[in-house]
Image (cartoon, helix red, strand yellow):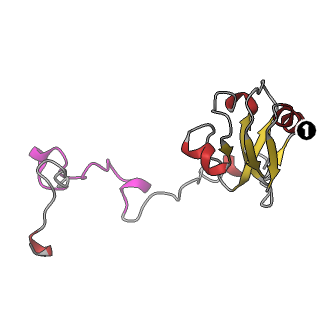
Amino acid sequence: MRIDTLSPAEGATKAVKRLGRGIGSGTGKTSGKGHKGQWARSGGGVRPGFEGGQMPIARRVPKRGFNHNAKKYYVIVNIEDLADLPEGTVVDYGFVMENGLAKAVKNNCGLKVLGKGELSVALTVKAAKFSASAKAAIEAAKGTAETL
């Protein structure tokens, strides 16, 4: 096999539109550009966002909001999601992601455990952050909450 012998699969490419090849082709004479005007000229047309001199919408509408570069995002898990796990399980970020207990978050800083729900099994939970109610619930169930 050589690079000059490669070709796309059958039907994978469209034939190029041949312009200005006579009246019978349907795109003869003006080549689909109509008669005269800015769009018929060579290099004609306007840049994207140009509205004929009118103030463009991107400049008329005020800017709003702010994206903080240093904001910390956590993967969130409630203790109700951990209630069905067997006794003595070690729950950390890797365990949560492998078992699909939470959705992945961009730029995440680790796992955060919140206190929604009930917990009756003793677990070892290793996370970056705990809410006060989550920590209390884990310890009440004879488990351990380790902050990383």
Tag 1 residue: 132
Helix, strand or loop: magenta stretch: loop
Viewer-proximal residue, 106 or 59? 106
Question: Which residue is located at x 56 percent, y 38 percent?
Answer: 100
Magenta segment range?
Answer: 19-41
- Measured from the top left, where is residue 73 in percent x and y? 75, 50
Q: Position of residue 50 (x, y in %)?
A: 59, 54
* Secondary structure under the numbered disc 1 in the rendered image: helix
Residue 117 position (above or below residue 129):
above
Going 79% across and 57% down the picture, which residue do you hit? 148
Eyeballing the image, is 148 above or below 122?
below
Kind of residue sitting beneath label 1:
Ala
**Local crowd at mark 1 within 10 Å, few (<14), some, or many (≥20)?**
few
Is residue 146 rendered to the left or right of residue 81? right
Q: What residue is rendered at 72% in x and 53% in y?
A: 110
Picture quarter with the N terminus? bottom left
Q: Is residue 65 among the parts visible in the rendering? A: no
Could you say where residue 143 lies in the image, as x and y percent from the top left? 79, 39
